Amino acid sequence: ASGTYGAITVGGSLDYSVPKSAMTKYAAAAEFSAADYSVAAKLSEVLAKADSKTYECSYFHKVSPAMQVGTEVKMAKGKDVGLAFGCMYKVDKDTTVKSKVDADGILSASYKQKVSSMTTLTLAATVDTVNLNESSKHKFGMAVNITP
């Protein structure tokens, strides 16, 4: 369930297992949105797993009509704090470039091009910059989306 009041949105979810007669997980989130930025926070937990409580925060900023930047912080008990920075740039009305790097040294990038009114082409790559010599750690892909 969620609700909005002005620039603030709050929501939550709750999973209940009928066979176990117990709640299995929950999440709660809040977001503040303005014309050129947004700030969000989320708390979630899977009750069957020990130390599964996770805190997440994000900040996104619209620098210009063509460029957006953002950052995410994620913290789970017993794990390193996750940190990521990313950006999106609209080259033109049919082309978008995105990139993201996280605290583990994973660099991701994508290029999305509208080829025709029915077809979109996406090229994407993920590179582990910490383990450049291990080719199994890198991923490359292509997607063609055709919608009639």
Image (cartoon, grey):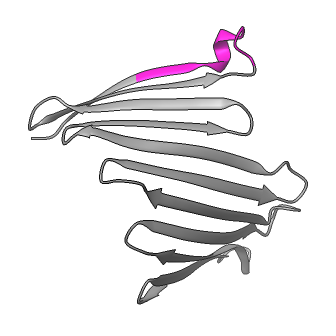
Position of 79 compared to 37: left or right? Answer: right
Identify the image quadrant of residue 100: top right
Res 12 quadrant in image: bottom right
Residue found at x 55% / y 69%: 39
Total marks in image = 0
- Percent coordinates x, y for residue 94 in the rendering: 19, 38
In this view of the protein, can residue 1 be seen by the observer? no
Residue 64 appears left or right of 126: left
- Could you tell me if residue 50 is visible in this image? yes
Residue 8, compared with residue 51, is above or below; it is below
Please report the residue visible at 81 percent of the width from the left and 58 percent of the height from the top: 76
Q: Is residue 39 left or right of residue 51?
A: left
Residue 9 vertical position relative to residue 78 in the rendered view, above or below: below
Q: Which quarter of the image is occupied by the C terminus? A: top left
| Residue depicted at x 55% and y 21% | 139
As drawn, 111 above or below 129: below
Residue 91 at x, y percent in the picture: 27, 36
Q: Position of residue 99 (x, y in %)?
A: 49, 36
Q: Is residue 134 magenta?
A: yes
Nearer the observer, 68 or 101: 68
Q: Nearer the viewer, residue 126 or 15?
A: 126
Is residue 61 positioned above or below 90 on the image? below
Residue furthest front as drawn = 64
Where on the picture, by quarter, is residue 136? Answer: top right
Residue 17 coordinates in the image, percent (x, y): 66, 74
Residue 132 shown in magenta: yes
Question: Which residues, given as a range, are shown in magenta?
Answer: 131-141
